[in-house]
Image (tube, helix red, strand yellow):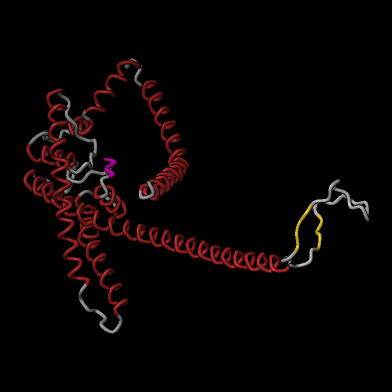
Amino acid sequence: MTSDGPGWKRMVVLFVLVVVYLCVGAAIFSHIEGDPEIERRLQLEAFLKNFIGNHSCLDHEDLIGVLREVNQEFTFALNTLRNRTVYTQWDFTGAFSFVVTVVTTIGYGNLAPRTYPGKVALVVYALIGIPITLIMLNYLGQLLTRLSTRVNKCRLCSAKPLVNKVLNMVLIVMLGLTILFILPASAFSYFEDWTVLEALYYCFVTLSTIGFGDYIAAMSENSLGTRGLEDVYRVVTYVWILFGLAYLSLLINYISNVFIKKAEEMERLTKEKLEAEVSRLQQELSKTGKSVYKTAANVKSSVKGKVWEAPSNGIDQETGSVTLLRIAQLDES
């Protein structure tokens, strides 16, 4: 029972910490995004009312039906209105993009099976593919850990080991951020016509498997133009995702280990302080016990040869006061 106690206590503390963190996050994003959403909806409502007013031939229910159809196939409808060639999303490269988001649990949500056989196949495929992918990413993370360990042995500053360790860690982090964030973000900014901030945002949301789906590389219009280059671009993007997931998981594990070590150190220090305080109290009690024993021994020696007896009526005959005990002096034999 004692071994399970600290584990459950730590679990409760972590659970409460996560719940508090979620509540804080909900309050922050509700405050930031709430009013702009209301404003956008009011603008859309005004636009729809104006559109219906200017097109009296359109019925309200007919417009709702059109919006539902367009919502299901927005990209197809948009490209059709622009007289552009529309490629199927479920060709091999499109399906490859889809299964990558499935097994990595990114799940952008832009592409999903509509048929019942497709939905059943997705469940079976995910149950098998997700564990296999996690094992592969774990192994890839171990290889990256070995690589980082080798880099960490480099002596950039041999005079000071601590400074050398910090410099090696900075080198590992900067190298990974450059290869998996800065360079890809620059490429996405160019090909997808995004700002640098939007590209960096997409990189983090994707590699952390948050996967909102508001930005998706290699799935929308880009500056490549030809279908063949778009396919190569799409495959390279998802290979980057696989390596990026392993690196970001390595980075997150490192940060988590730092927090865990700090928590364990605080727990150890607290335990040592409590043990020291208990030891001090035990010593104080021991000293107090010895003092009481010594006092009792002195009292015992001082009353040697005396007998304790109670008066017959409980009242001191000489003073008339109530007395519980009276000492009668006896001659020592």
Along the line of sight, which residue is nearer the eye, 83 or 302? 302
Task: Give residue 42's position: percent from left, percent from top.
Answer: 44, 31
Query: Relative to 115, does residue 213 appear above or below in the rendering?
Result: below
Q: Could you tell me which residue is drawn at 35 percent across and 57 percent down?
A: 260
Task: Give residue 109's position: percent from left, percent from top.
Answer: 24, 35
Helix, strand or loop: magenta stretch: loop
Along the line of sight, which residue is nearer the eye, 49 or 68? 68
> Which region shows up in magenta?
210-214
Q: Is residue 41 left or right of residue 181?
A: right
Res. 215 visible in picture: yes
Q: Could you tell me which residue is drawn at 41 percent across and 45 percent down?
A: 12
Q: Could you tell me which residue is drawn at 14 percent across and 60 percent down?
A: 143
Q: Could you tell me which residue is drawn at 8 percent across and 35 percent down?
A: 91
**Please, which residue is most extreme toward the bottom here?**
159
**Please, which residue is most extreme toward the front here?**
333
Task: Give residue 131's position: percent from left, percent from top.
Answer: 16, 42
Please identify the quarter of the rendering in which residue 287 is found: bottom right
Please identify the quarter of the rendering in which residue 100 is found: top left
Res. 29 visible in picture: no
Along the line of sight, which residue is nearer the eye, 12 or 323? 323
Q: Is residue 78 magenta?
A: no
**Dividing the image into 4 quarters, which one contains the C terminus?**
bottom right
User: Count of labels shown?
Assistant: 0
Please identify the quarter of the rendering in which residue 264 is found: bottom left
Query: Relative to 166, does residue 317 appear above or below in the rendering?
Result: above
Q: Is residue 243 left or right of residue 253?
A: left
Query: Relative to 155, does residue 68 appear above or below in the rendering?
Result: above
Task: Give residue 274's position: percent from left, percent from top.
Answer: 49, 60
